[in-house]
Image (tube, coloured by chain):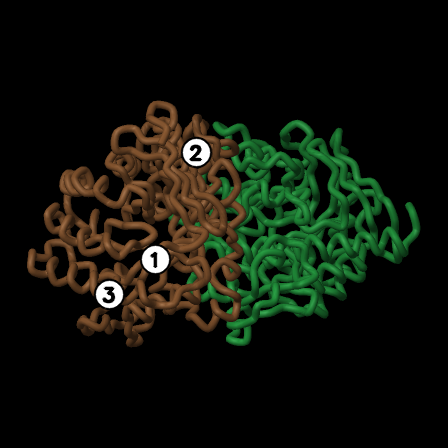
Chain colours: A green, B brown
Amino acid sequence: MRTDGFRFELVATAGKARAGILHTPRGPVPTPVFMPVGTAGTVKAMTARELAEPPLDARIILGNTYHLYLRPGLEVIEACGGLHRFAGWDRPILTDSGGFQVFSLAAINEIDDDGVTFRSHIDGSQHRLTPEQSMAIQRVLGSDVAMCFDECPPAGADGGAHDRAMARTTAWAARCARAERAPGQALFGIVQGGTDVDRRRRHLDQLAPMDFDGYALGGLSVGESSAETYRVLDAVAAELPADRPRYLMGVGTPDDLAHGVAAGIDMFDCVMPTRNARNGALFTGEGRLNIANARFRLDTAPLDADCPCETCRTVSRAYLRHLFMAREILYSRLASLHNLTHYAGTMARLRERIVREGRAA
Amino acid sequence: MRTDGFRFELVATAGKARAGILHTPRGPVPTPVFMPVGTAGTVKAMTARELAEPPLDARIILGNTYHLYLRPGLEVIEACGGLHRFAGWDRPILTDSGGFQVFSLAAINEIDDDGVTFRSHIDGSQHRLTPEQSMAIQRVLGSDVAMCFDECPPAGADGGAHDRAMARTTAWAARCARAERAPGQALFGIVQGGTDVDRRRRHLDQLAPMDFDGYALGGLSVGESSAETYRVLDAVAAELPADRPRYLMGVGTPDDLAHGVAAGIDMFDCVMPTRNARNGALFTGEGRLNIANARFRLDTAPLDADCPCETCRTVSRAYLRHLFMAREILYSRLASLHNLTHYAGTMARLRERIVREGRAA
């Protein structure tokens, strides 16, 4: 089922770590890559132009099927010619399927083999998502990469619950693969199975023959310890098909990204850089800091002297702290720009190192 | 008392309307000019770079003595080398004296001939502002134009209250004129007197001999009707010294600006473009619109097809409405950028017309 115009090129490997290029109809994406999350048609506090400008230079962003379906609704996005034109973003977009959000945000009324009935977290209205409906929404959104609709068991689910979710996710993946897609839209499968490595392998064995354009690990970093996440990653990531992009969903800290890359992951997304930014937690080369801390009150140094972002080039920690304490909108802008640039820089450095120290593919 | 490096150059006149250039040590400001308000060290939702970029190209912004004194406090701004460096803005700044804010935002404990004792609107802490203290704060802020500390009677004050406020404002102006200032910092006097034209003229007669670098009309648009504001403006604006910049404080709508310019005003400030933007009220060539209105739900047109701002060049009304309804930070950014650009364009067109249709000075 490989999609025309969509291709993963392996550039270099260093151990399990890979440097590559994800070729898409809307341009190439050097990997490993972190994808900023644009939940509701906007990467929070950022313009499309700012996201694309170097040094941040985001090559692909995420959109959320669940959120966009509920608000503004498909009629609006269809009238506006799809999510790219709606949001003024002409580079690639990956949309998740709504699976994770339905299971984590909505009030679930019913899960059956056909799909999920739930109530909106915005207004309580009742809706139903099925694999076909998720694909129909993603088709209207017109994302460059669609994800299969999956069942995400809650943290702490027992083995039986994982087995049932895997069976359902496999059946739903087959239905997603048969659904009509937007022109050039790739489709990724999602491997579930919790923290049990054997279960992960069994699920991958079910999905691999379906020949998806890429493979994701879902259901990690949902409450288990980092050690557990890493154990699964170390065992499973490099077993995902080597000629397809490998995507670790919803993860994580800069350390998690480094660990994921070392384990063989190519793509990541997480709300952490933008959400933490808004809450005062800023990432620097010397670790995370809380800008509300009184020690920054008179600190005239830039947030991170080694960071090339506009925030670090133009204002001080004292100014950022003032804006945060005064709840100024500009704070969220400057902080989000910085954290996203920090993440992009982290990924670029990991990639350079693989290319420099690894073997050409 | 004219300040070195600060000079008002008259370029053309059309009736009472004037086109000029305010020369300051931090660069020239073509007038008439609208000054975006940066209350707490930031024009809300805007970066300094964005303010300076064409087509907005703000040449001077406002800072608030009252707000900045309370938060972050002078120690912080002094440590950061003044307000310009603190906020990363290298063009001119005008600071108001704190007078208007003390009388409109704070809980007043006592007004006497020496100054005002009040409680902070942020944390209830008690503070005292005097003409000397206001000037000392403005000196630390390092603004390019300082304003005299004035008493602003509430809307509906009787004649006696206005007379007492005028006498006090005159005495305070003399004390401000004697205070030490930052290098190159100009000082403007503020004419009070409510809506009584004779009172305004009497107050101007007291202040004119003090030879301030510029003259402002305070205490207008504080609750009286537009007709009353315009009556005072029409009578008094052109009587302010012709060789100094004339500043109408805290006004107003695009129509108010046009009226003020026609009456002979050179400088304006108001929170309206940014505050209204955040509340959904957007200015266009065809009037004000409320972006929450359902008629914009599927409206793929730009907010204002004739506006050169990034918002109007890149996104639709439908997208702006979605961001507003979803309370996205990006909405406030795009809306503020647009409204400020609309105001700047309004002033630029008024100026061009004076130059084109008026007489060279």
According to the picture, the residue beneath numbered tag 1 turns out to be B1
Q: CA distance from mark 1 to mark 3?
A: 16 Å
- Is residue A157 visible in the rendered structure shown here? no
Front disc: 1 or 2? 1
According to the picture, the residue beneath numbered tag 2 turns out to be B318
Q: Residues within 10 Å of mark 1 (few under 14, many from 20)?
A: few
Q: Quadrant of the N terminus of chain B?
A: bottom left
Q: Chain of mark 1?
A: B
Q: Is residue A290 left or right of residue A227?
A: left
Q: Chain of mark 2?
A: B
Q: Are marks 1 and 3 on the same chain?
A: yes
The quarter of the displayed image where residue A8 is located? top right
The amino acid pointed to by label 1 is: Met
Front disc: 1 or 3? 1
Q: Residues within 10 Å of mark 3 (few under 14, many from 20)?
A: many
According to the picture, the residue beneath numbered tag 3 turns out to be B172
Q: Position of residue A150 (x, y in %)?
A: 62, 47
Q: Position of residue B55 (x, y in %)?
A: 49, 36
Q: Chain of mark 3?
A: B
Q: Position of residue B341 (x, y in %)?
A: 43, 38
